[in-house]
């Protein structure tokens, strides 16, 4: 990686590296009256489903991807592991989270231990454009709302292809470029434009094909995401000055409301779109 890319990568990691996230999550859960020894996925969802439409979007992608029980999944940019824990529980799968943020990996490990899933879900610090895994080791590569931070999408999907076994699937749920530019900043994935890399959906789709994948599903989910955005905006307006005990602000701090409002504006003004896709690596190459 050259010096300039290294600097960008460090700035992206610094956006997510927010200290002892797990302790703040546990404090938020206790303040909401939750029993830390009997946590449910729903308790953690306000903070560990760090993407538009939360758990609903994750369940929809799970259905779309149709991954087999017991599979070995890599969650690229999996954050603090909400989707990884959900996939593991639903499919009895082993899930490895790869993430650029050390603090997210550490928080993910603690939350996963607390949920009693640390035998099935593990965390690895690293970069999606240079994955620290051997060829053909995973049955599926999963990724939600992480490619916005990745400038070199050719390397991202080339690596996804490399680490998949023949016949394996890539499942994605990603924010992409819109018809109007530029987006408003800050947004939840970037404080400024130099760490945000939104490409038009047609371009991303072409890059995935060029990596060698066969397309199984490609869905524009911008409209349902806009409906979610309207509801989220109303909820945020109702709670101004009174952030919830547990939410994205537990990770990103006081700027979270502003970031989320900008994401909503970007959606409603056609500055970003949201797509889901499922692709397959051929059984025989
Ligand atoms: C918006 S969060 C989404 C987290 C998670 N996928 C979810 O939906 O809850 C984006 C995540 O992508 C990770 N990320 C960004 N660029 C990355 C890269 N080049 N390699 C690995 N992870 C990356 C960030 O550290 C962060 O955890």
Image (cartoon, rainbow, N blue to C red):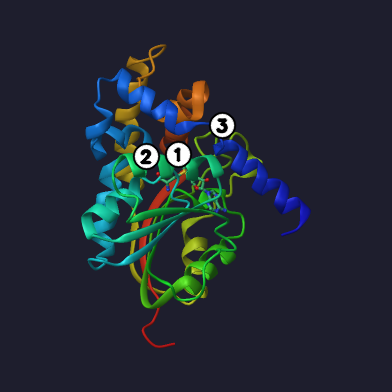
Q: Quadrant of residue 19?
A: top right
Give how far apart the Cα atoms at labels 1 and 2 are. 6 Å
- Horizontally, is 264 left or right of 11 in the view? left
Residue depicted at x 33% and y 58%:
219
Give how far apart the Cα atoms at labels 2 and 3 are. 27 Å
Query: Residue 197, image x and y in percent?
Result: 58, 49
Q: Mark 2, mark 3: which one is toward the viewer?
A: 2
Label 2: which secondary element: helix
Q: Quadrant of the C terminus?
A: bottom left
Residue 70 visible in this rendered orientation of the protein:
yes
**Marked residue nearer the N-terminal end (2 or 3):** 2
> Which residue has dot 3 on it?
186
Residue 53 visible in this rendered orientation of the protein:
no
- Horizontally, is 130 left or right of 233 in the view? right
Against 250, residue 281 (above or below) is below
Query: Residue 236, image x and y in percent?
Result: 36, 21
Q: Residues within 10 Å of mark 2 (few under 14, many from 20)?
A: many
Label 1: which secondary element: helix
Against 49, residue 239 (above or below) is above
Query: Residue 109, image x and y in percent?
Result: 42, 45
- Horizontally, is 35 left or right of 23 in the view? left
> Which residue has dot 2 on it?
111
- Horizontally, is 41 left or right of 265 in the view? left
Residue situated in front as seen by the camera: 135 or 144: 135
Residue depicted at x 54% and y 63%:
156
Query: Residue 227, image x and y in percent?
Result: 29, 37
Give how far apart the Cα atoms at labels 1 and 3 are. 24 Å
> Which residue has dot 1 on it?
107
Residue depicted at x 49% and y 35%:
188
Q: Are marks 1 and 3 in contact (CB under 8 Å)?
A: no
Q: Residue extending furthest bottom?
A: 284
Residue depicted at x 72% and y 46%:
7
């Amino acid at each position: 990686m050259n010096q300039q890319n290294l600097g960008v990568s460090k700035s992206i990691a610094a956006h997510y590296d927010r200290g002892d996230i797990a302790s703040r999550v546990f404090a938020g859960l206790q303040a909401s009256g939750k029993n830390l020894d009997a946590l449910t996925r729903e308790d953690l969802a306000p903070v560990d489903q760090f993407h538009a439409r939360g758990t609903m979007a994750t369940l929809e992608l799970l259905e779309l991807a149709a991954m087999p029980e017991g599979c070995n999944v890599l969650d690229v940019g999996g954050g603090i592991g909400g989707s990884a824990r959900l996939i593991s529980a639903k499919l009895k799968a082993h899930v490895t989270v790869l993430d650029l943020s050390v603090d997210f990996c550490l928080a993910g490990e603690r939350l996963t231990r607390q949920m009693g899933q640390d035998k099935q879900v593990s965390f690895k610090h690293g970069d999606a454009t240079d994955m620290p895994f051997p060829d053909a080791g995973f049955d599926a590569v999963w990724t939600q709302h992480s490619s916005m931070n990745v400038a070199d999408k050719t390397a991202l999907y080339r690596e996804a292809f490399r680490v998949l076994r023949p016949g394996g699937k890539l499942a994605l749920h990603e924010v992409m470029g819109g018809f109007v530019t530029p987006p408003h900043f800050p947004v939840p994935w970037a404080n400024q434009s130099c760490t945000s890399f939104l490409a038009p959906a047609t371009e991303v789709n072409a890059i995935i094909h060029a990596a060698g994948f066969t397309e199984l599903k490609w869905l524009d989910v911008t409209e349902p995401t806009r409906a979610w955005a309207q509801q989220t905006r109303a909820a945020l307006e109702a709670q101004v000055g009174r952030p919830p005990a547990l939410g994205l602000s537990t990770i990103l701090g006081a700027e979270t409301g502003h970031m989320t409002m900008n994401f909503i504006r970007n959606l409603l003004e056609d500055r970003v779109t949201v797509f889901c896709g499922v692709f397959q690596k051929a059984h025989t190459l």
